[in-house]
Image: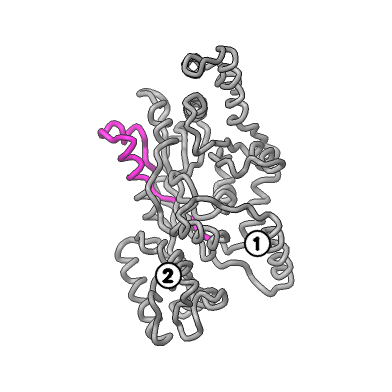
Amino acid sequence: MVARLAYDQKVVDAAMAHAAETGVPGEVAFEEARRYAREIVPGFSATVYFGFGTRAAKWLSRLLFRVRVGKVDKELGRVDPTATVIFVMNHRSNVDYVLVTWLVADRSAISYAVGEWARVWPLSALIRSMGAYFIRRGSRNALYRKVLARYVQLATEEGTTQAIFPEGGLSLDGRVGPAKLGLLSYIVEGWEQGARDVVFVPVGLAYDRVLEDRVLVAAAQSEQRRFRNRPLAVAGHAVGFLWARFRGRIKGFGTAAAGFGAPVSLRDHLAAGGTVESLGERLMAAIAAVVPVLPVPLVAKALGDGAASREELTARVEALMARLQTGGAVLKLPPQGLSAVLDEGLTPLIRRGLVSENLQPVERERALLHFYAASVQDL
């Protein structure tokens, strides 16, 4: 694939244009394109993916959360088996990669588009062997963008199952954001009439606890999408969690759930006069519609600026659930009833200090409370 990509005529043309624009020799420009190709193309290993990766993903997911599937649209059973399937997901947490890898492991291996954060040894080697390809999200280098575009197009032509996060990064406010059209535009531009169809599967992800929540809220408040890497702090939290988990003092971080919406055919979308822009809007709306509603976000939304009593909060939760059900929302709540919903949603908020015992938001944690409530507002 590296050779095919480097010698692809469109990449060669882009390399020659880059040489003419920058004044470097053609051989140098061509070698630069080869370097980008080696950087992007994954080195998939079935042994690593199915022998280690999916098992580790299952273990980690179940260690951290109660994993539930909120919805699987019946149309998914009728997808053309020759089509290229691309999962499009909202990006709530870095756990998204782990969760979805496990949930679809019995059907397919998934090639993820992964940001530059993962290009550190030895993590980069492991991720590449899991079939992921790295992208420089902020790069404006025309040659690099052409190499990336052609890789995505070639992989799509070959039927490689892929997963992308159209938002382009983790949600800073808890909502499902608008699509950034980079990868989608590459797929649409590379598709030709008569080629195998491309089918997009919307996936909505939700968590009772987003592990990076404080980092994301701080980034939103600073209005800069910059995250400080603190490996020692992360390792310390991980060791503390594992010790408490195996001693039975905590049971994890609540529920994590995924909803799988109705597939969207690229062939049908374009035949109906659709564009890349309308495709992005359609996919993000479909993702938002299948994001499961979980206890913590539901209670955070119902709480608002505080409640006078538990009875008042219970009534608000019940009314909100009724409105969501009427609107067709995917509710993934405890089957034991309203009391269990309130307990599972309220107890973590109080334990973490986001809500006081008298059911009032703690002022310094108000932004974090809104972060969780926002995932319900989309519906």
Lower position in the chain sequence, tag 1 or tag 2: 1
263 magenta-colored: yes
Residue 11, compared with residue 132, is above or below; it is above
Q: Which of 254 and 229 lies nearest the eye of the viewer?
A: 229
Contact check, label 1 and label 2, Cβ < 8 Å:
no
Locate residue 270, reporting x and y percent.
30, 32
Residue at screen point 46% across, 57% down: 220
Helix, strand or loop at mark 2: helix
Mark sitting on residue 370: none
Q: Is residue 343 left or right of residue 57?
A: left
Residue at screen point 70% across, 38% down: 47
Q: Quadrant of residue 2?
A: top right
Q: Residues within 10 Å of mark 1 (few under 14, many from 20)?
A: some
Determine which residue is flagged by label 1.
63
Q: Is residue 327 left or right of residue 74?
A: left
Residue 83, compared with residue 211, is above or below; it is above
Q: Residues within 10 Å of mark 2 (few under 14, many from 20)?
A: many
111 magenta-colored: no
Q: Quadrant of the C terminus?
A: bottom left
Q: Quadrant of the N terminus?
A: top right
Q: How many numbered marks, from 0 up?
A: 2
Determine which residue is flagged by label 2.
298
User: What residue span does the magenta drawing correspond to?
Assistant: 256-283
Q: Which of 253 and 223 lies nearest the eye of the viewer?
A: 223
Q: Amino acid at mark 1?
A: Leu
Q: Amino acid at mark 2?
A: Leu
Helix, strand or loop at mark 1: helix
